[in-house]
Image (spheres, grey):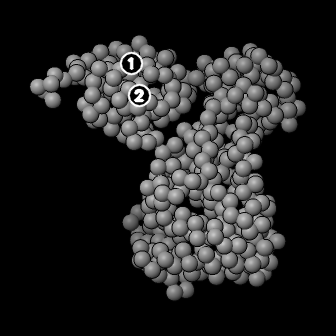
Amino acid sequence: MDRVRNPYRTAPGSDPPELAGRGAELGAARYAIEMTKAGEPAKPLVFVGLRGMGKTALLRRVAADARESGGITIVGEADRSLRFGEVMRRELAEALTRSESLPSRLGSVIRRAIEKLPKISYEIPHGAGSLQITGNETPAADDLKANDSLEDLLLMLNEQLHHHGRSLTIGLDEIQESRADDLLRIIRVVHKTAGTEHPILFVGAGLPNSAPVLRSVRTYTERWAYFRLGLLTRADTFDALDVPARALGVHWDQDAIEQVYVRTLGYPYFLQEYASAAWVHHRGERIAADDVVATATGVQRMLDESVYDRSFASITPREAIYALALHGLGPGTHHSEAIAGALSMEAADLSSVRTQLIKKDVIFSPARGLTEFRMPLTNEYIDRHLPELQKRSRLGENALKPKSRDER
């Protein structure tokens, strides 16, 4: 068996070969693509979830489906230092190279759009200055007219695409990191075209706080279609592991899949790591439970070190007390008042501790007053390291004692 042909993707940024358990999301997206192609407005789609749930992979698959249907896609990852005009220029340039069947007239439309985009400035390393790429009559990127022109340019491009029988899909990853002005322009353009015969399809992905980020820009985004991606079921885990292996002539024993499931609880990122290690260890045409057991300790140690240890190593005794209180409430999202109640304190007295844990990427707030561990299965990590965290927390017990009325 050629172990190099490992079907499980563990490299950062790689997509799993099988998007198991995401049939509802893919079905909704394909329906939206067909509606858009037919000139009917579809609800914008937003995939939300914790890290490692497959949001980016799902967004990429939807973009690929939109391209396969004959559409043009503009897909980018939000970054507060990156303007949408830069993303648009890059994506349109790639569309020219990957769409061999583009009619010459449509290709000319895209080239004209690229020429009209705001200028891009690249910093040259070692303080050697900057390099600017400009088009004809390009306005300054931070000028108000440039913002308006970008919207007008998107509307013009979209109209021309539909005139040539093509649709436009805009995809945005890491929505919670978006620049407010970029997000506003995208939302406004999508909303404007919804009332025309040439609508734009929007597909986004981000952490659970992406919904309030969108609402803060335009309240009507609360009527968009949101899909919360969670852990895979046992049946979905079977598909995620077995389908890619069978394509290469290998099958998983049922008890081997169960071994992976009980260790990962269906967390897609961890599934790929355990499956990859078992694949390298196995021989022949089957992956047995022994292959998982033999590699599990090493995989678990690697995941603890790469996913959790960095954040938890730096927490103070007071922060350890807070983390243990959140852990004691069980997996999922909890109100700040509940965490404070578990410590017999007021939520206001814990605000500074909560803020520091957010900065250290231990927790995050999906909505006002709510708190959740940033990474899935953090509760299980704490279970494995409970004695050391309890020991650290005892050093901060006096610092987090409830204050008397007079002290408040």
**Which label was assigned to residue 240?**
none
x then y, percent, for residue 256: 75, 19
Kindly check if marks 1 and 2 are in contact, taking CB atoms under 8 A apart as contact: yes
Residue 126 seen from this side: yes
- Please state if 39 lies on the left or on the right of 120 as rendered: right
Residue type indicated by callout 2: Phe
x then y, percent, for residue 200: 65, 66
Q: Residue at x 80, y 36 (%)?
A: 244
Which corner quadrant of the image does residue 314 belong to?
top left
Q: How many marks?
A: 2
Q: Residue at x 37, y 32 (%)?
A: 336
| Up-down relation of residue 13 to residue 290 (above or below) | below
x then y, percent, for residue 101: 82, 71
Which residue reaches farthest bottom?
Answer: 137
Residue wearing tag 2: 312
Q: Earlier in the sequence, mark 1 or mark 2?
A: 2
Q: Residue at x 74, y 31 (%)?
A: 236
Q: Secondary structure at mark 1?
A: helix
- Please state if 363 lies on the left or on the right of 349 as rendered: right
- Please state if 28 lies on the left or on the right of 116 as rendered: right
Q: Secondary structure at mark 2?
A: helix
Which corner quadrant of the image does residue 201 belong to?
bottom right
| Up-down relation of residue 231 to residue 88 (above or below) | above
Q: Which residue is more in the foreground, 40 or 190?
A: 40
Residue wearing tag 1: 389
Q: Residue at x 51, y 33 (%)?
A: 375
Residue type indicated by callout 1: Leu
